[in-house]
Amino acid sequence: MPRIDADLKLDFKDVLLRPKRSSLRSRAEVDLERTFTFRNSKQTYSGIPIIVANMDTVGTFEMAVVMSQHSMFTAIQKHYTLDEWKLFAAHHPECLQHVAVSSGSGKSDLEKMSDILEAVPQVKFICLDVANGYSEHFVEFVKLVRARFPEHTIMHS
């Protein structure tokens, strides 16, 4: 028998977001940059809190160059090789504070990520690209990554 949920439901047409008063005179005065200190890594990050996803088509080095110019972040897709990372780091060191290396949760993924982070130590962010973030395997993988990289900030996509 299907369950009927009789609770009140709201949609966008039912909700009004009322803007707060502001002393700003123009949109040009808006500053989106924020500073975050992450609980586990104790790192501080300053930038605009927009992250380009680590998808093959957008999480690219080219995107990272553009986004970092605007203090925005890119989770780099996981298909770049170690040599491609080294070349990117050599040509665009100013971007490295605004990127994360992405990894799956397999043994070879961990080895590749470790090689990249060893070769490009300026990268302090790790993006774990796992579909089932609720699985025991993923939880154990995060523990392993945290133990190996205690000073890095770990995110999940």
Image: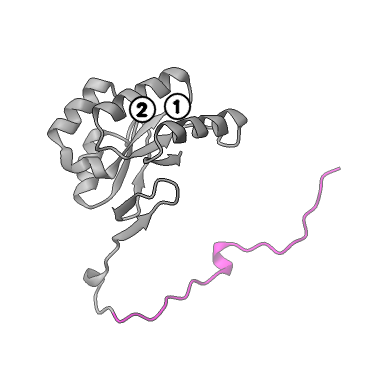
Image quadrant holding the N terminus, namely top right
Residue at the image position 15 percent from the left and 37 percent from the top:
92
| Residue nearest the observer in this picture, 10 or 155 | 155
| Residue nearest the observer in this picture, 57 or 74 | 74
| 32 inside magenta stretch | no
Q: Position of residue 3 (x, y in %)?
A: 81, 48
> What residue does disc 2 label?
78
SS for callout 2: loop
Q: Is residue 154 above or below residue 87?
A: below
Amino acid type, callout 1: Gly
Q: Is residue 16 left or right of residue 7?
A: left
Q: Is residue 31 above or below residue 140?
A: below
Q: Position of residue 109 (x, y in %)?
A: 41, 22
Q: Position of residue 143 (x, y in %)?
A: 51, 34
Q: Is residue 58 above or below residue 42?
A: above
| 3 inside magenta stretch | yes
Residue at the image position 28 percent from the left and 34 percent from the top:
60
SS for callout 1: loop
Residue at the image position 49 percent from the left and 30 percent from the top:
144
Residue at the image position 61 percent from the left and 31 percent from the top:
136
Task: Give the residues drawn in magenta, as a range.
Answer: 1-23
What is the chief secondary structure element of the magenta stretch? loop
> What residue does disc 1 label?
104
Give residue 89's quadrant in the image. Answer: top left
Earlier residue among tags 1 and 2:
2
Q: Is residue 150 left or right of residue 14?
A: left
